[in-house]
Amino acid sequence: MRIQKFEADRRELIEVARGDRPADLFIRGGTVVNVYSGELLPHHVAIYKDRIAYVGPRKVAVGDETQVVDAAGMFVVPGYIETHSHPWILYNPVSLAERIVPLGTTTVVHDTLFFYLHLGYKGTVELIEALRDLPINQLWLARMVAQAGYPEEGEWFNPAFVRKLLEHEDVIGTAELTRWPMLYQGDPLIVGTIEFAKELGKVSDGHTAGCSFEKLNVLSAGGLSACHEAITAREMLDRLRLGLWTVLRNSSLRPDLQELIEPVVEGQISTQRLLMTTDGPNPSFIEENGFLDGLLRQAVRMGVPPVTALQMVTLNAAQYLKLDDDIGGIAPGRRADVLILPDLENFRPARVVRAGREVARDGRLIAPIPDIAWDLYPSMKPLSVAPELLADPNLYRLEAKDGEKVPVIEFISNVITRRTDAALSTDGEYVAIGDRPDLAYAALVARDGTWVAKGVIRGFGGRIGGLASTYNTTTELLVIGRDSGAMAVAAERVRQMGGGIALAEDGEVKLDIPLPLYGIMSDRPFARVVRDHDRLLAAVQKRGFPFHDILYSLLFLTCDFLPGLRLTPLGLYDVKRAQVVRKRRNLPVRS
């Protein structure tokens, strides 16, 4: 497990603690929130280089060169730890860090999915190491499988490569296993990889959505460490009672904290194995509600004691990650990730100290952000589909015979669909939807133009002419709309951008958002990403999109683990039956 190497010499740290060597930073007069004992203590904090040297009532180790920070009337708390992050919700790891460090998050555990899909083992490791210089402690969880089936997936997610990634010191475990039935059935590759992670002393994150108590028993026996998928208080208790670290989620897609927190407020349960997560919120959600600071505010407003809430995003999180000797508390020898809070209600820090250096003040980042040369990490799967292929409107229309029943993807929420079979009108070769304003075409086109999977969707947005997006869990080119001509225009615009999202109607592009980083992330600053997201959501809602989170609708339409019909690289896929109901169509190779 990754304990960051001391920048401070241990013997020098001892000297500072004794008062024989001056501290670099002395936080004076504040009230330390001791997450170990649950007490509020009038203590000073002495920091030497990257470590806390002393916590107590004496004014030790203050020399002429010591920076003294007056924290009188304020609270000194550990930096917040996000244990389940997806750093690719339009933003990227750099722009996300710029926004959340001033909000108090000093450690974040990211998912490798899209980096691994596009960079493979070698490129992913190189990028992870390049991101180390950001003013935030970034750790990683390695995916064992994709979120959508590919014919070549077994080769891409070769267990030997995944295990090699797990051996990297910044990778602290296996990422959420969205295909939990594989573990339930005892798949030898999944079981073996989890066991390998345990031998390394690392964690295995879970994704047990929809699991009964009996099935959770099996998955816990299979080695899962944690789960963030409870959406009711009962589901939360099921996971907690089976020994899983239970992560209470409040995200843009699933703002469930109010229900999940009830047993805590009522004092029914121990909170020692409870954490909180934002689980990849969209950028506008962060801008409006904050990050972990927002979860703390909400939990305390609902009646959770402030110290208890803080423990969930500091000490408990560090213990789950097996890093509590390094982070998660204000104590000698721990890394100096320290926040100074004006109160225990708002949880927005006046100052943020990361590894002994002040990195943010009064909501502003003051630490430099290193330039990441993204062009040094090019995708192994460039968007190379031929423009003449995308120009054909029939590429996006579903083939069907007169009278044939067609399986329709019906949206019943942002991300949940169901299958409804319907006899639709045809023009003799393709489904014709002109007389059905509730329907739209959907096509998933390979990035290299070698295949297409097609379907018909209902309840997505009856006035969307053409919407094209590489922002989906495959990062192939997803195209949705009622007008196959507009779909072609939108698809071509995304191709020109090298990845992104485009909306077209009446032969014109009405909106475009370039996502040059693997088709899933922007290289723009966070504030611009917020504006891009707001423009997109407003545009699709104006055209009939009925839900609140367009990014997750796009992301998960192509996945293979949520209920209903999905459009995947294998074809139109019935998740419940684990069956491809319409295979993808291979396309002629174009020179």
Image (cartoon, rainbow, N blue to C red):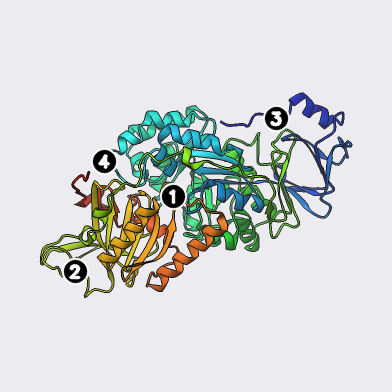
Q: Nearest the camera: 283 or 412? A: 283
Residue 186 lies, in percent from the top left, at 34, 36
Q: CA distance from mark 2 to mark 1?
A: 34 Å
Sequence-wise, which precedes: disc 3 or disc 4?
Answer: 3
> Dot 4 lies on which element?
loop
Closer to the observer: label 2 or label 1?
A: 1
Q: Is residue 50 visible?
A: yes
- Judged from the image, the secondary structure of the residue bearing numbered disc 1 is loop
Identity of the residue furthest to the top in this view:
11
Query: From mark 1 to mark 3, how far is it between C-alphas?
Result: 36 Å
Which label is found at residue 273?
Answer: none
Along the line of sight, the residue nearer the viewer: 207 or 512: 512
**Side of 80 where 235 appears, left or right:** left
At label 2, the amino acid type is Ala
| Mark 1 vs 3, N-terminal side | 3
> Residue 151 shows which numbered tag?
4
Instruction: Give the percent coordinates (x, y) of residue 542.
Output: 41, 73
Observer-nearest of 466 and 169: 466
Label 3: which secondary element:
loop
Q: Is residue 243 visible?
A: no
